[in-house]
Image (spheres, helix red, strand yellow):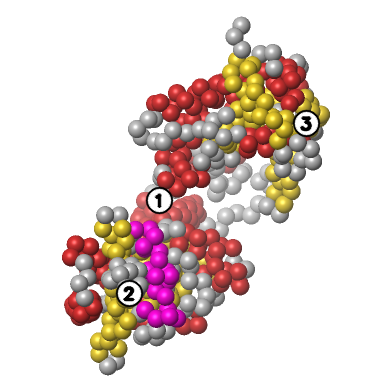
Amino acid sequence: MTSEGLKPRWLRLRARFVIFVLSGVALVATAMAVVSHQEASQALLDSSQEHLLALANSQASELARRLEKVSAPARDLAVTLEVVGVASETMANQLISQSLVANPRVYGMALALAPYSFSPDQRAFSSYAFRSPQGLKIMDLNSPVYDYPSQNWYLVPALLGRPVWSEPYYDEGAGNILMTTYSAPMVKDGKVLGVITADVDLGNLGREVHSLTVTQGGYAFLITRQGNFLASPKDELVMRQSIFSLAEELNRPGLRQLGRRMVRGASGVIRLNDPLTKKDVWLAYAPVKGVGWSFGVVAPEEAVLAPVADLTRHQLYFALSGLTIMGIVVLLMVVGLTKPVKMLTSGAKRLASGDLLTRVTGIRPGDEVGELAHTFNTMATDLHAHVEELKRKKQQLEDSLHRIVLLENIETTLSKFVPASVKARIDEAPEAPDLNKRETDVSVLFLDVAGYTKMSEQVTGEDMNFLIERYFSSFLDDIYQNHGDINETAGDGLMIIFQDDDPVQHAVNAVNTALAVGRKVAKVNQELAGRFQPVSINIGVNSGTALVGSSRFEGLAGTRWTFTASGSVTNNAARIGALATEGRIYIGPETAKRVGDRFDLESIGPQRLKNVAEAIEVFQVLGAKEA
């Protein structure tokens, strides 16, 4: 476009320059103010969340301290009576009455002795002292309709041999109030002598939680270890609904997940729509140590964001004031910059420094300076286009390299989980692998840890995980050396598939693996002697034709693929393994037929297998035959 036909400017160069510069300054100042406001707002929001979580933690800790003051008298009295015993009914009444008077937070206390421990001719003895409007009262809990040794507050601590808190319940025998009970067993020389209890009036506790000041429009609540509402701003929820039933009623999966985290003892802050007020709120929750409850505080979002709104107003005032001052300063700086040549010089410097988007504006064409400005802008545009093209190609190359690295990482990671047989099929036809089930002659080995359930009850979860990993890792190399393919794992067991072009060879490989497992288990038992009980691993092997390939299971959450061997060969292998005990190796008749010339076998006779019409002969592998 040429300068012919353009009207002359009505503003002089100085005025135009001042207007352009001030507009740019205003834009930069606004951008800086927006960034600063966002960062400060996020910092205030984080601070508000931390304050809300600190409030939940402090209240949960305070509640735990109060409950500890309730449990301590029962625990102390149980320890004392383990030593001195209970001489008489008068003594029992005096002890629990004195403890009740000395501990005003305790609503009631019971001293319940084990059957026939008070006297040989008296089966039960239980004294209960509690507070009433008429003062302290004492009653005998034993009656034909109330067999206290069968009640949970007595039975659970007596069986566990340690103190427990009961789930809140409504007491209809004495105070007729909502309460929870702390039960401490008296144990001497491994024998339970009785139980000391301390009751908490949950009505008072609920009122204290309800009266807690969180924020304007906020509230606090308390749930039990089963998710039942123990304190809530709505009385109709207390001990009538749980956080899980409320989630089901409102179809709120997120609320159900929150309830699971709370009853598991987690703490945190979450934003959600309040099911009670139907407003967006921030909820902080923390566990009440010792009793298994969870304490929550809820604050409306507008209350949490109130400091952010105040900050916004203050920053707006400061931004306007700063922009005004900056405009005056810029005006004073650019008054002397009146010549277009200086604009071109400034543009050239910016271009040389790498700002390829710089352009010289405000200079009309028609003279040498206008032509120079047009040439400068054309050059900057072309240079920017070339640089952007180079950047685009460079980014494409980097993206391609990144995808290659990512695919290699994915392949490396998936190779740890994909069975070798699946890899082999993919290698045969990478573009369209055939994963459909095929009839294949295989040997299937099932192994499981004997007494896994009992062992898991006797050791910690961490130790159990260590044992399983230690034993299974010891014979992993033997599985791979014998060309076994670990197909399924289930906590205490493995399913391993052996394949080979020679049907005898994969049967031999399976039995060799079973014997190697036995040796490795014995070695690990010796290494862990003194720390853990020895482990036995029972094994079953069966050979024959099975359908080997993928199975697809589709559901609302997505599609799940598995690669396995199915059919009677697999089912019978699992059931043969179930027959094995004390670390024995049992094999089916087809496997025995294939490997009988290489291993010492002993028939245990025909065996009935579950859901198999006819009995099949099962053999025990005693070891490899000498060459």
Q: Are marks 3 and 1 in contact (CB under 8 Å)?
A: no
Question: Which mark, by number, is residue 546?
Answer: 3
In-front residue for pair 153/562 = 153
Quarter of the rendering containing residue 444: top right
Query: Which quadrant is home to the C terminus?
Result: top right
In this picture, is 599 found above or below 102?
above
The circle drawn on residue 319 is none
Classify mark 2: helix, strand or loop: loop
Could you say which is closer to the camera, residue 480 or residue 533?
533
Between the residue at mark 3 and the residue at mark 2, the CA separation in whole angstroms equals 67 Å
Q: Earlier in the sequence, mark 3 or mark 2?
A: 2
The mark lying in front, picked from 3 and 1, is 3
Q: Residue furthest front?
A: 121
Q: Residue furthest right?
A: 439
Residue with the mark numbered 1? 334
Q: CA distance from mark 2 to mark 1?
A: 106 Å
Q: Residue, x 71% and y 26% (percent of image)? A: 443
What's the amino acid at mark 3? Ala
Residue occupying image coordinates x 36% and y 63%: 157
Residue 286 in the image: x percent, y percent? 38, 63
Magenta residue check for 150: yes
Q: Residue at x 60, y 34 (%)?
A: 580
Q: Position of residue 154 (x, y in %)?
A: 37, 68
Instruction: Look at label 2 and name its amino acid.
Output: Gln
Inspect the image, locate mark 1, and give the three-letter code of the amino acid beneath it.
Val
Q: Is residue 277 left or right of residue 52?
A: right
As drawn, 625 above or below 109 = above
The residue beneath circle 2 is 122
Judge depth for marks 3 and 2 and give the one in front.
2
